[in-house]
Image: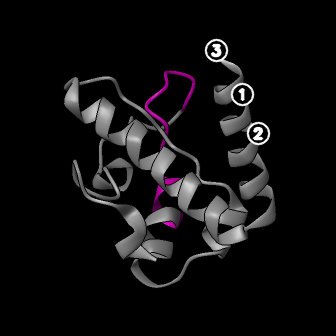
């Protein structure tokens, strides 16, 4: 990694620390990326547990979706309940679509 790349990472982390809104957008994009990749490969079951702070930083349908993601049953075998393949663990936004319209 070049020095410029390290500087870019430092700037990005600093921006995330300085701007709550930037952190919210970053976290939503990360959640969405994981769900999109899982969907693209037809099968890896993922379970995203959005951070409480992220949930509380949103409203409306997005908050409902994030709450549902938190409450969904894990597909992991350690769960006593049957796996949850419900839409609660689906993408927040479609491929190429930004999650910013959800905020």
Q: Which image quadrant: the N terminus?
A: top right
Residue 75 is one of the magenta-drawn residues: yes
Q: Is 96 displayed left or right of 6 in the figure?
A: left
Residue reaching furthest to the top: 1
3 or 2: tag closer to the N-terminus: 3
Principal secondary structure, stretch drawn in magenta: loop
**Which residue of the protein is positioned furthest toward the bottom in this rendering?**
60
Say which residue appears at 49% left-offset and 21% top-offset.
77
Q: Residues within 10 Å of mark 2 (few under 14, many from 20)?
A: few
The Cα–Cα distance between marks 3 and 1, rounded to whole angstroms, is 7 Å
The residue drawn where x is 64% and y is 27% is: 5
Point 30% across, 40% down: residue:
36
| Callout 1: SS | helix
Q: Tell me if label 2 and label 1 are in contact, CB under 8 Å.
A: yes
Q: Nearer the viewer, residue 78 or 92?
A: 92
Helix, strand or loop at mark 3: loop
Q: 10 Å neighbourhood of mark 1: few (<14), some, or many (≥20)?
A: few
User: In the rendered image, which residue does mark 3 sit on?
Assistant: 1
Q: Which residues are magenta?
A: 67-79
Residue 6 image label? 1
Q: What's the coloring here?
A: one colour
In the rendered image of this protein, does residue 3 appear above or below residue 99?
above
Image marks 3 and 2: residues in contact by CB distance under 8 Å: no
Instruction: Pick whichever, 90 or 22, lies toward us.
Output: 22
Q: Could you say which disc has been placed on residue 71 in the image? A: none
The residue under label 2 is 10
Q: Is residue 19 above or below residue 88?
A: below
């Amino acid at each position: 990694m070049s020095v410029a790349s390290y500087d870019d990472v430092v700037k990005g982390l600093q921006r995330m620390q300085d701007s709550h809104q930037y952190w919210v957008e970053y976290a939503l994009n990360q959640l969405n990326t994981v769900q999109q990749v899982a969907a693209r490969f037809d099968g890896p079951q993922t379970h995203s547990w959005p951070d409480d702070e992220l949930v509380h930083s949103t409203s409306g349908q997005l908050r409902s979706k994030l709450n549902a993601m938190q409450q969904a049953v894990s597909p992991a075998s350690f769960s006593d309940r049957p796996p949850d393949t419900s839409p609660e663990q689906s993408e927040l936004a479609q491929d190429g679509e930004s999650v910013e319209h959800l905020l």
